[in-house]
């Protein structure tokens, strides 16, 4: 039996101590704790890393606190368009969906793309037809609606601005979600899910569903789930860059993630963070913002749940 470990995030951004009430802070930590525990329970029962990350991400999607599934941000049209990806490190199998609507758990649809189609990435109407073929029921718009997200949208509605829900207002909620896990067979996996950016239009897709940008897993190196300004994470091919630094340059997980988040992404103007794990169960959770909702259970079984720097 190999050592098991799990790390999750709920988005990175301008999260400063004192800008959130203690009750709110507790709500976030409780939601992270629940996702962490349920994901970890899968690993404890010898479940696979891919099931562990899907389980953890589903719980975060079901929470209105995060910008994924329920609680996703509003598009310029006042709708919710969600993106998600999942990847297995032992086979390099991957599945992703983007621009989907009405699906309660986009991460599960991404997993179905990986396991039940010949494809890796399905988008928009086609992804919705695939969901229909797989028997998914649709939630109506009200299910995804969150008052705070609505107000965030009202402030820039009608403008050409689009905005990371991570930034600006001190009471804003943050929240693309993701998970990485290492299971008892030594396999690793990563999953990421998001509502994207407030007021996005033109079918804008961020890094989260793009294999290698916001999500990646390879047993030889690491599993990575990112959060932050998606355009920069796409240009930096961030998740794969971490993997490459480990594979080709021999960097450790810690060194590779630091190099990418604290130097490479920053140097092109990107802000955000990531959670990463390797096949020995080492975990890294770097970010270059004020904070990142994050939690982990390491190979010694020690739990850490944190928000600020
Ligand atoms: N990276 C996501 C995107 O650009 C947003 C986020 O991390 O909150 O769609």
Image (tube, rainbow, N blue to C red):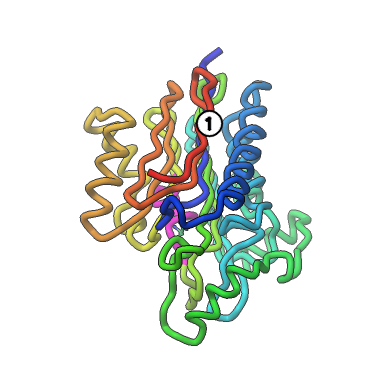
Q: Could you say where residue 140 lies in the image, as x and y percent from the top left? A: 75, 69
Is 273 placed above or below 77 here? above
Nearer to the camera, 187 or 168: 168
Q: Is residue 99 visible?
A: yes
The residue under the point 50% across, 17% down is: 300
Is 48 placed above or below 231 here? above
Nearer to the camera, 167 or 186: 167
Q: Could you say where residue 152 lies in the image, as x and y percent from the top left? A: 53, 73
Q: Could you say where residue 236 lies in the image, as x and y percent from the top left? A: 29, 54
Q: Residues within 10 Å of mark 1 (few under 14, many from 20)?
A: many
Quadrant hosting ligand 1: bottom left
Q: Main secondary structure of the magenta part?
A: loop
Look at the image and say whether residue 21 sits in the magenta stretch: no
Quick check: 67 left or right of 239?
right
Residue 45 quadrant? top right
Nearer to the camera, 284 or 206: 284
What residue is shown with label 1? 6
Is 208 placed above or below 42 here? below
For label 1, being within 8 Å of ligand 1 is answered no
The residue under the point 76% across, 63% down is: 138
Which residue is the extreme one toward the top? 1
Which residues make up the magenta segment?
Answer: 205-215
Question: Where does the N terminus fall, quadrant-wise?
Answer: top right
Q: Is residue 93 visible?
A: no
Question: Where does the C terminus fall, quadrant-wise?
Answer: top left
């Amino acid at each position: 039996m190999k050592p098991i470990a799990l790390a999750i995030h709920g988005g990175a951004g301008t999260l400063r101590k004192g800008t959130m009430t203690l009750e709110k802070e507790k709500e976030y930590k409780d939601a992270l704790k629940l996702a962490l525990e349920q994901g970890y329970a899968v690993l404890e029962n010898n479940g696979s890393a891919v099931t562990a990350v899907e389980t953890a991400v589903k719980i975060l999607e079901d929470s209105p606190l995060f910008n994924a599934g329920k609680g996703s941000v509003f598009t310029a049209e006042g709708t919710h368009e969600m993106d998600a990806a999942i990847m297995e490190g032992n086979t390099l199998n991957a599945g992703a969906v983007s621009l989907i609507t009405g699906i309660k758990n986009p991460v599960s649809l991404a997993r179905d793309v990986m396991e039940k189609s010949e494809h890796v990435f399905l988008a928009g109407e086609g992804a919705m037809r695939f969901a229909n073929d797989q028997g998914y029921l649709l939630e109506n718009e009200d299910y995804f609606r969150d008052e705070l997200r609505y107000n965030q949208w009202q402030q820039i509605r009608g403008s050409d601005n689009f905005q990371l829900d991570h930034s600006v207002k001190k009471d804003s909620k943050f929240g693309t979600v993701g998970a990485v896990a290492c299971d008892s067979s030594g396999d690793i996996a990563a999953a990421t899910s998001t509502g994207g950016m407030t007021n996005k239009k033109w079918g804008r897709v961020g890094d989260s569903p793009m294999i290698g940008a916001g999500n990646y897993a390879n047993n030889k190196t690491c599993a990575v789930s990112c959060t932050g300004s998606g355009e920069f994470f796409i240009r930096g091919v961030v998740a794969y860059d971490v993997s490459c630094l480990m594979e080709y340059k021999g960097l450790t997980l810690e060194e590779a993630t630091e190099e990418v988040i604290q130097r490479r992404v920053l140097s092109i103007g990107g802000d955000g963070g990531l959670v990463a794990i390797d096949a020995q169960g080492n975990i890294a959770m770097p970010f270059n913002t004020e904070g990142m909702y994050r939690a982990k259970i390491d190979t010694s079984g020690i739990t850490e749940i944190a928000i600020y720097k």
